[in-house]
Image: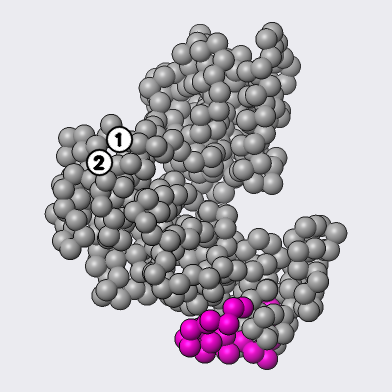
Amino acid sequence: MRNTLTERQKQYIQKFRGKKAAVLGIGVSNAPVIRFLVEAGASVVACDVKEESRLGAAYQDIAGLPIEFRLGRGYLDGLREFDMMFPTPGMPLDLPELVEARRCGVWQSNEVGLFLDLCEAPVIGITGSDGKTTTTTLVGEVLRACGKQVFVGGNIGNPLLSEVFNITADSVVVLELSSFQLQPLRKSPHIGVILNLSPNHLDHHRSMDEYAEAKEGIFRYQGPSDYAVLNLDNSWTRSMGSKCPARCVFFSRREKVPGGVYVRGDEVIVDIEGAGRGVALSFDDIKVPGGHNIENFLAVAAVTALAGCDFEYLRSVARDFTGVENRIEFVAEKRGVKFYNDSSATAPSRSIAGIQSFAAPIVLIAGGSGKNLSFESLGEVIAERVKSTVLVGDTAHEIESAIRRAEKKLGRNVRTLVVDGFDEAVHVAYSEASPGDVVLLSPACASFDLFSDYKARGERFKELVKCITQCKNMKTSRRTVRHGSIDH
């Protein structure tokens, strides 16, 4: 830790000295937590269900620190003996061991909670079921363009706790925040954004209500001088407006919003007293495809106006922004077939947005590991908009069933093929495509049945596309295609 800590930071750090801390889960998010606690003088026990041999680089990253390890079965035993605990994002907070520990007075936080407590700069927090990374990236770029020192992190893949003592009061922090990160928080950002809400992570949250309640952490602890930016067009986020203790700023693609941000013709209008009024940008300025990206830019316009940025910087960034990796990312083109990587679409709502971004015929690659989500709406959109669908992974048959039900409901058929492996899915999708078509990887599912995460899935897709586009005479085998509905 640097020597120029503020008095508030020094006082906060003192609360950890001599305390016994359990860090639950050894990985990217908790590594900076462990380092902070060690430097603050806490006695740290790093706990994980995995044994040392399975932790790999995550274990080696902290192995040299003066900490104890509790690995394997029983790693959650005896938590009541600790003063504090730090569950990794995604660990269910209703586990009996955690519930009992809290009942016994064990204080609970996480990497984001520690960061918010220590950070001297204003924080902008962005969450939602869809569009978090794109919006977080855009806000950061606009703030940089208008001359601010910006730190971007959180769920976007960069825990900022290790940098918190280098962030001064005249900086700005932009955090992408997941429901997992928000759920245990007891402090909210200065500007909290909820882009939208739709069913997601119901393999972790017990219900949609619990999922929504976790998201509300982004504004729950705000005060009158803070701002909550919410989507008026989404029924869940619209209803949250009455719960906000801060000033609520709505954005809408469908209706005029006095005091908010809205669409007028092909222009984005900002009408926020004290922050800006006028035409922020036009649709022609926005280069990334899809109506959902219009909504993302509405949120960006609201946030950057509240942060004091002139509209010219928003327009400049919009004109140069072509998207974020793994989010409707253009990969390559061969014989008139364009390939797009939307691997980050890990829920049906995100794949629906991806499909609706294209007017061209789509050959869709979907499927993966499930999150207890319904595929009914996705099935209907596929039946309405998709030329062919190639399904792979644990959820392939579940998605296929949803497509079949949609076919009966809508009275039309879509060619649907189920294959054994991801590589084969990409090759079969290409063989299904004609010049002018789009091959879209938009799985609607997590990747854990076949890959470590959605990024690894996206990288493999791009490797396969590179092979396809560089091969002069590629022949595709369909030997692993098991069954499908054919539109003859």
Rate crowding at label 2 as few (under 14), some (14 to 19) or many (20 or more) other CA atoms within 10 Å. many
Task: Please name whichever residue, 123 or 221, is drawn nearer the observer in this view of the structure.
Answer: 123
Q: Position of residue 40 (x, y in %)?
A: 64, 83
Q: Quadrant of residue 418?
A: top right
Magenta residue span = 1-23
**Which residue is at a point 67% across and 34% down the rendered structure image?**
460
**Which residue is at a point 60% across and 18% down the rendered structure image?**
430
- Disc 1 and disc 2: Cα gap in Å? 6 Å
Query: In the orientation shown, which residue stands out farthest toward the right?
Result: 53
- State the SS at label 1: helix
The answer to whether 184 appears left or right of 31 in the picture is left
Q: Position of residue 309 (x, y in %)?
A: 29, 55
Query: What amino acid type should be assigned to the residue bearing mark 1?
Result: Asp
The answer to whether 73 appears left or right of 84 in the picture is right
Judge whether 127 appears above or below 412 on screen: below
Query: Disc 1 marks which residue?
Result: 285
Q: Quadrant of residue 69?
A: bottom right
**Which residue is at a point 59% across and 25% down the rendered structure image?**
390
Judge whether 144 appears above or below 386 on screen: below
Query: Disc 2 marks which residue?
Result: 281
- State the SS at label 2: strand
Judge whether 222 appears above or below 232 on screen: below
Tell me if residue 221 is in the magenta stretch: no
Q: Quadrant of the N terminus?
A: bottom right
Rate crowding at label 1 as few (under 14), some (14 to 19) or many (20 or more) other CA atoms within 10 Å. some
**Which residue is at a point 24% across and 59% down the rendered structure image?**
249
Query: What amino acid type should be assigned to the residue bearing mark 2?
Result: Leu
Colour theme: one colour
Q: Position of residue 422 (x, y in %)?
A: 68, 30
Whether residue 51 is visible to the viewer of this picture, yes or no, is: yes
